[in-house]
Image: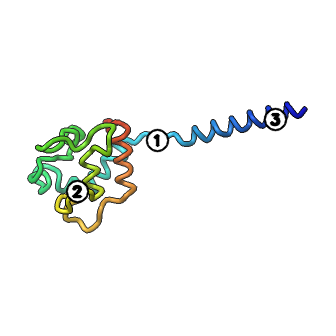
């Protein structure tokens, strides 16, 4: 009888652990639903044709294609590698203060919004 109870406890524990593992699955971040609205609210006023950020760097954020093309000096996003993506370095203020983004704004981009963009990049920076 004791063996049956022990087996039942082991099976129940395994089931609970499996259920917890399923709860930790990271949700897919959508470019269209999650990332693009953040960029539009915080970046697009400067990083579009005629904007000061576009004129200074050649970096447009008007479309997904523009975003992935980067600046005249190179890529801003490395799909799958947020740590190697200059966009995140600039947003987190880890670059020289003169080029941290958003430039000249008194209010930085929220940590939650940066985390969303970081997760999207780490998930492959897909146009989804």
Q: How far apart are marks 3 and 2 (CA)?
A: 57 Å
Q: Quadrant of residue 42?
A: bottom left
Circle nearer the N terminus (2, 1): 1
Residue 30: image quadrant is top left
Q: Quadrant of the C terminus?
A: top left
**Residue 109 location (% of width, % of height):** 31, 59
How busy is the neighbourhood of tag 1: few (under 14 within 10 Å), some, or many (20 plus)? few
Tell me if mark 3 has few (under 14), some (14-19) or many (20+) residues whose alpha carbon lies within 10 angstroms of its own: few
Q: Is residue 12 left or right of residue 87?
A: right
Q: Residue at x 18, y 58 (%)?
A: 99
* Mark 3 residue element: helix
Of helix, strand and loop, which one carries label 2? loop
In the image, residue 18 lies at what x, y percent? 63, 36
Q: How crowded is mark 2: few (under 14 residues within 10 Å), some or many (20 or more)?
A: some
Q: Which colour scheme is used?
A: rainbow
Question: Which residue in the structure is indicated by mark 2?
Answer: 95
Q: Which of marks 2 and 1 is in front?
A: 2
Q: From mark 2 to mark 1, how far is it between C-alphas?
A: 29 Å
Between tags 1 and 3, which lies in front?
3
Report the residue marked by disc 3: 6
Q: Residue at x 23, y 56 (%)?
A: 95
In this picture, residue 79 sits left or right of residue 17: left
| Spot occupied by residue 22 in the image (x, y as percentages of width and height) | 57, 38
Question: Tag 1, which secondary structure?
Answer: loop
Query: Does residue 51 sit above or below 82 in this rendering?
Result: below
Q: How far apart are marks 1 and 3 (CA)?
A: 36 Å
Sequence-wise, which precedes: disc 3 or disc 2? Answer: 3
Q: Mark 1 points at which residue?
A: 27
Q: In which quarter of the image is the N terminus?
A: top right
In this rendered view, identify the residue nearer to me: 100 or 52: 100
């Amino acid at each position: 009888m004791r063996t049956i109870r022990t087996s039942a406890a082991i099976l129940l524990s395994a089931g609970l652990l499996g259920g917890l593992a399923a709860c930790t699955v990271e949700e897919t971040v959508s470019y269209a639903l999650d990332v693009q609205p953040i960029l539009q609210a915080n970046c697009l006023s400067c990083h579009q044709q005629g904007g000061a950020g576009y004129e200074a760097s050649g970096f447009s954020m008007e479309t997904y294609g523009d975003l992935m093309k980067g600046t005249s000096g190179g890529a801003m996003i490395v799909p799958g590698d947020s740590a190697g993506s200059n966009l995140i370095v600039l947003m987190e203020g880890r670059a020289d203060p003169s080029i941290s983004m958003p430039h000249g704004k008194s209010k930085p981009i929220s940590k939650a919004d940066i985390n969303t963009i970081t997760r999207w990049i780490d998930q492959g920076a897909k146009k989804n």
